[in-house]
Amino acid sequence: MMVKIALIGLLGIGAQWVAWRTGRPAIALMLIVGILAGPVLGIIDPERDFGALQEPIIKLAVAVILFEGGLSLNFRELRQAGGAVTMMVIIAGPIAWVLGTAAAHFGAGLSWEISALLGGIMIVTGPTVIGPMLRTLRVPARVRNILKWEGIVNDPIGALLAVGIYAYITYEGPNANIAVISMDVLAASFVAAALGAALGFAITWLFPRGHVPEYLKAPFLLVTVIAGFVIADLVKHETGLITVTVMGVVLANRQIYSSQALHRFKEDLAVLLISGVFIILSATLDWETVQQFRPQFVIFLLLLLFVVRPISVLVALLFSSVPWRERLFIAWIAPRGIVAVAITGLFALRLVDHGFPGAEALVPLSFAVVIATIFAHGFSAAWVAERLGINEGKGEGVIIVGANRWSVALGKALQTLEIPVTIADTSKFALRRARSENLTIHHGDILDEAHNDNIDLGEYQHLIAGTENDSHNQLITADLGPEMGFDQISRLSNDSRSKSKVGHGRLLFESGADYTSLLDKERDGWRFSKTNITEIFSGEEYRRNLAAGEEPLAVLKKDRRLLFFATDAKPVIENGDVVISFVAPDTPEERKADRAAKDAEKNGV
């Protein structure tokens, strides 16, 4: 069992790492790996390996994943997307349910009762698939926010819709009453939402007042999430999803100490859980389930992809301010994931026990939907965004925090290489020099701006923390490193003792040159130069031509990657690269010779 658990973690995280290295959708790779480890090779058999623990493990994992998703639902994001999100929930959801029910009945040949249940479940998309997909895309913030909010909010709605339909179709005799069942589900939903809000407000009251020690905050929060989910689920199945979502939203929109640290803990835990649960669920797809797949199910899949989703989204956003290109992209993207499979599997078992004909087809059909949507949307999302003109591409910019003579000179040098540069500072006075040099500026504290989404860090391939305050530079690195990647942040040091410290990010330049010495050199006429590396003038030749104190700053690769030199990072210089160096000023004789050469060229000599 220990080997199986370790293998599940290794396969899930390994698939995510390969996805990061190759740019492929992580959800598709995790699905492939799970199928290979499960039905193909027979290494992992969740039903055999976990037995009765499989369902509670998956349900608790989904609860934590939804809570983490709720933590990302900040109401500030609704400034642009609020109306669209509302319409996606109250208009697109019901339309998708009605059309999905019809597609399941006429396309897959299921009874109306089973079709209504499946149609309700299929309105969910979910953070388990939307999150990894959006992580590899750079589309407008409005599109990301609409898809993210829709996925997280619709998950519990779809589950509750399925609960209500299941309650209705399993009522014995003629006493089934839609009004009674609806009130029952709505009452349970209200109780679950109130419980989530109460727990969220309790946490935001306890933590800032020091009633929970710092080292216990993350475990305390995790246990509270699980307890809230279980309590609500005991009241009525699947209402726990509402509790954890509401709790996450409350925490996301109320100020608590250590909120960033807690969010990162939950984000790391969610990545681990998504990896593990996806491997487990895809490994349950045994050959017996596959054999239950009918050819006519393909019709249902086609209707779901090309009719149900596009019509429901386009109708819902018909009178919104969302540009039509973005509407078309949203109308195409709707991958299903863990929640859809888990809920469908749960109700399929119960309906089979009740003797409903066609209920056994729910499991293979739900897996077919997940596989089809993950591959169709996962592999085509970037292509569709490119064709619609909303793909913002890979961020190539550089953001320099701290406006001074040296940073402005660096910004000008990078701009001549057509690299977008932004200089950020809290002082309008300090930004005047950058503005006069036609550099893009941003006035504000980089940490507040990034956390409030006023700056999209995805636009930048590198950040340089170059303020005069060494502690602030280290704080920027420590705070934004987990989001951007520590290898994409460099800092200047203003304290020679800090060069030997570990864990504060990379020190810019191989020598770790400090802030004061760089400003002194710039004042003395030092400048940034560009050198093209060729077969004739190689990297070794370039190194030999550097004078004392001169050193490379960065290498611009053919694919527009900008790799910076640091005390612990020495990029390889290859043919075709452009090296940016910080070099000493020319001597008077060199300047005179340079002017003579330019005059001769101008006169045609």
Image (tube, rainbow, N blue to C red):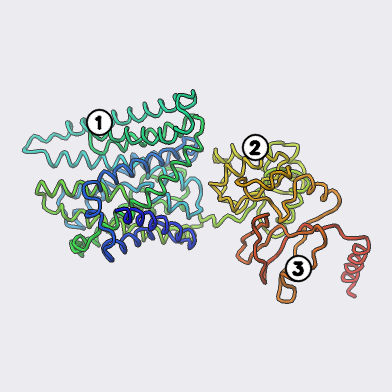
Q: Quadrant of the C terminus?
A: bottom right
Query: Is residue 33 found left or right of 530 in the rendered image?
Result: left
Check residue 444 in the rendering and tell me which mark sits there, or answer none: 2
Residue 465 vertical position relative to residue 591 in the rendered view, above or below: above
The foreground one among 492 and 576 is 492
Point out the frontmost of discs 1 and 3: 3
User: Residue 119's x, y, as percent?
Assistant: 24, 48
Q: Hey, which quadrant is residue 527 in on the image? A: bottom right
User: Residue 217's x, y, as percent?
Assistant: 45, 32
- Kindly tell me whether residue 310 is visible in this rendering: no
SS assignment at label 2 = loop
Q: CA distance from mark 1 to mark 2?
A: 45 Å
SS assignment at label 1 = helix
Q: Amino acid at mark 1?
A: Ala
Mark 3 Cα-neighbour bin, 10 Å: few <14, some 14–19, many ≥20: some
Query: Is residue 336 found left or right of 136 in the rendered image?
Result: left
Check contact, mark 2 vs mark 3: CB within 8 A.
Answer: no
Query: Is residue 514 found left or right of 457 in the rendered image?
Result: right
Query: Is residue 214 found left or right of 240 in the rendered image?
Result: right
User: Residue 564's x, y, as percent?
Assistant: 66, 57
Q: Amino acid at mark 2?
A: Gly
Mark 1 Cα-neighbour bin, 10 Å: few <14, some 14–19, many ≥20: many
Mark 2 Cα-neighbour bin, 10 Å: few <14, some 14–19, many ≥20: some
Residue 599 vertical position relative to residue 152 in the rendered view, above or below: below
Q: Mark 1 or mark 3: name the one nearer the start of the chain.
A: 1
Q: Amino acid at mark 3?
A: Tyr
Point out the frontmost of discs 2 and 3: 3
Identify the residue under disc 3.
542
Q: CA distance from mark 1 to mark 3?
A: 72 Å
Q: How many marks?
A: 3
SS assignment at label 3 = helix
Identify the residue under disc 1.
188
